[in-house]
Structure formats: structure tokens, C-alpha cells
Amino acid sequence: MGCDLHLFIEYKIGNIWCNIGHEFNMPRNYWMFGLLADVRNINNLNRHPKGLPDKISYGTHNDAFIVISKVKSEDTCTIEQAEQWRVEIKDGYAEHPDWHSHSWLTYEEYREILTDYKEAFNESYDFEYDIVLTIMEKIIQRNIETRIVFWFDN
């Protein structure tokens, strides 16, 4: 069974985090996953996941968590289900049971990982990772704080 990366680019306006569009569909690259958050690590270079930041954008939150409801539906779960999953439960939401290794990186941290990748493996990574970096650079050029928030599934 494969592992996928779920990635969101966020930027901060005042005290509020917003996200660019929706989730970015990133290619499977287990060397990169190891560098990002020690997931499917097939190398000795890694960063341990930081968990989700305290404040995240509405769009990122909606993907990371499931609403707890008295009646189960396609997009909700009951408190009993959430407790059975043994996930974080907070403010009427349960952490999605299929997601793991949540983390986030600043622009500088992400750029460093891409550099480390090229040096460690002497090859280029998939261009989608550069697209994310380019978007973050455009945000930084406007003096706006940016980061990526991400997690993995199995």
C-alpha cells in the first residue's frame, strides 16, 4: 500500500492563516518523505514531524479534522467512533484517523530540504516540489509570512 503526501500552502494576513487553493497533489517520493518528516524513510537524513501548528487555515483544518456529530454521516463521525480511533479530539472535531506524521515548514526550512535532497541523492526531485517553492517565494516577495502544512496517509 502506498503512502501519499497531503500538502497545503498557507500565508498569514494579520493574525489569520489562509491557504492557497486546496490540497496540492504531490508525487510519491519516499526519499523526499523521509526528509520532510521521517516518513517511509529510506535514508539517514530526516526531520521529525512537528505536529500541526496551533493555528491553521480553515481549508487545512477541514481536511485535517472530521466534525463530531450525534449522527454519523459521510463527512462526520460520532464521539464513540473518534474515541475508538484514539485520535486527538478538540472543540467538536476529531483528527482524521487515516492521516499521520503531521508537520509544517517555513519557506526557509522547505528550501533547505530541497537543497539537501539534491546534495544527498545527486538527482533532481519532481517538479511539483519546485512549484510549491515558487509559490512560497512569490508570497515572501510581498513580505507575507508563508509555510507549508502537510501530513501523510497509508
Image (spheres, grey):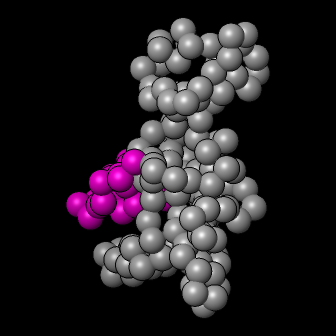
User: In front: 33, or 43?
Assistant: 33
Q: What's the residue at 68%, 10% (across, down)?
A: 70
Numbered disc total: 0
Measuring 35% from the left and 53% from the top, which residue is drawn there?
50
> Secondary structure of the magenta portion, mostly?
loop
* Residue 43 image position (x, y, % from top left): 28, 59
Is residue 61 found inside the magenta-colored segment of the image? no
Q: Is residue 62 left or right of residue 124?
A: right
36 to 133, vertically: above or below: above
Residue at the (63%, 88%) spot, across then down: 142
- Residue 30 % position (x, y): 43, 55
Q: Is residue 104 above or below residue 4?
A: below
Looking at this view, name the residue that lies furthest to the bottom: 141
Residue 1 visible in this rendered orientation of the protein = no
Farthest residue to the front: give it: 14
- Whether the magenta-drawn stretch holds residue 30 is answered as yes
Left or right: 27 in relation to 115 = right
Report x, y in % for residue 83.
47, 14
Residue depicted at x 42% and y 20%: 86
Q: Nearer the viewer, residue 71 or 47?
A: 71
Residue 73 visible in the current orientation: yes
**Residue 138 lies in what quarter of the image?**
bottom right
Part of the protein shown in magenta: 28-51
57 on left or right of 30: right
**Residue 72: quadrant of the picture:** top right
* Frontmost residue, 119 versus 144: 144
Residue 18 percent location from the top left of the image:
66, 62
